[in-house]
Amino acid sequence: MLGSAAVGWVYWHLDHNIKSVDINSALGDDRPAPAMTTPSPADSVSASPLPTGSLNILVLGSDSRSGKANKELGGGDSSGARSDTAMVVHIDAGRTKATVVSIPRDTLVTRPSCPLASGGSTAVAYGTMFNSAYALGGPVCAVKTVESITNVRMDHYIEIDFSGFAKLVDALGGVDVTTTQDIDDDKSHLRLAAGAHHLDGTQALALARTRHGIGDGSDLGRIGLQQTLVKALLEQMAGIKLLTDPARLYRVADAATAGLTTDTGLDSLTELMRLGQSLKGLTAGRVRTVMMPVVTAPSDPNRVIAQEPAASDLWASLR
């Protein structure tokens, strides 16, 4: 009885860590068509068939200012947040291959009218920065803006904040990365010589945020570091064999869910586990990382715009 109670408490605790947003209800039917999903045969872990169809997930890293932990990690003052990192994760049918497309936050886009939780809606904005969508209208506007510029349906939404990301990396035992140049960034407080490094959560977060100490100091250089980090984390997760270490599995799950916000389709531990089980054949070597093709904006040398037709061709390949 004590064992059952403990398991029940752990499940309840992890389940209640997750925050969610009902994006489907907010956006209604004025969206790109969803991809067809097909079930796989039921296995011994899942009582019902696991889905095997293609999937598109918008993953955002938020520089949330809420909470002491986020402020200490560089979240700034006590209110507001921006989408510091934006990636569209496309999982192929069969779920053994994936493409991760990074969208530069400095991209100038047409931001569509977005519904607001308080009622009413935002006005359409032309030539505005991509990350303004999240700052103005939260996850709902971020999803609508991505769907507007890509014409690709986002099947799910996942957001993790500063402290959640750092805790996840620490729970995994850190992460191994190799940098190709020295990094000295006063903004992210990261200093690394070129070469191989084992980073803890705070250092990994700093690497994901670094841009001033590399290349031309733009968001494009930071995206390269973020993509390197994504691959390294996937390799770390595959290498530590979580299922044979219950204590570490709990720490990782607790860290992963504590700073997590999802759409209502992924807002329970059961749903996240089913997604994870459907991806068991996906390895780091089968994940391709790319950036949305961009060029310097004619109106502002510090901003970029989508490079056409290359950008449209990329998004079309994910439908």
Image (spheres, rainbow, N blue to C red):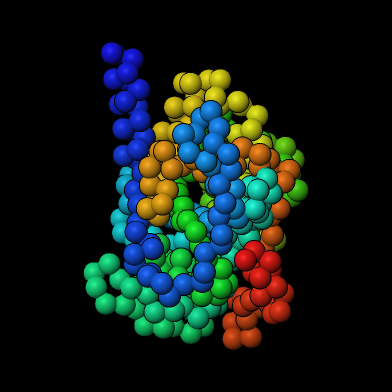
Q: Nearer the viewer, residue 138 or 185?
A: 138
Q: Which of 287 and 222 is in front in this view?
A: 287
The quarter holding residue 121 reads bottom left
Residue placed at 60% from the left, 55% from the top?
A: 54
Residue 319 at least partly seen: yes
Residue placed at 45% from the left, 66% from the top?
A: 142
Q: In this view, does 294 lie above or below 160?
A: below
Residue 228 at least partly seen: no
Most distant residue in the front direction: 41
Q: Is residue 260 above or below residue 140?
A: above
Residue placed at 46% from the left, 21% from the top?
A: 247
Q: Quadrant of the N terminus?
A: top left
Q: Is residue 124 above or below residue 107?
A: below
The quarter holding residue 241 reads top right
Residue 155, given in percent of the width and then of the height, sits at 49, 59
Q: In which quarter of the image is the C terminus?
A: bottom right
Q: Is residue 269 left or right of residue 223?
A: left
Residue 232, given in percent of the width and then of the height, sits at 66, 41
Most distant residue in the left direction: 118
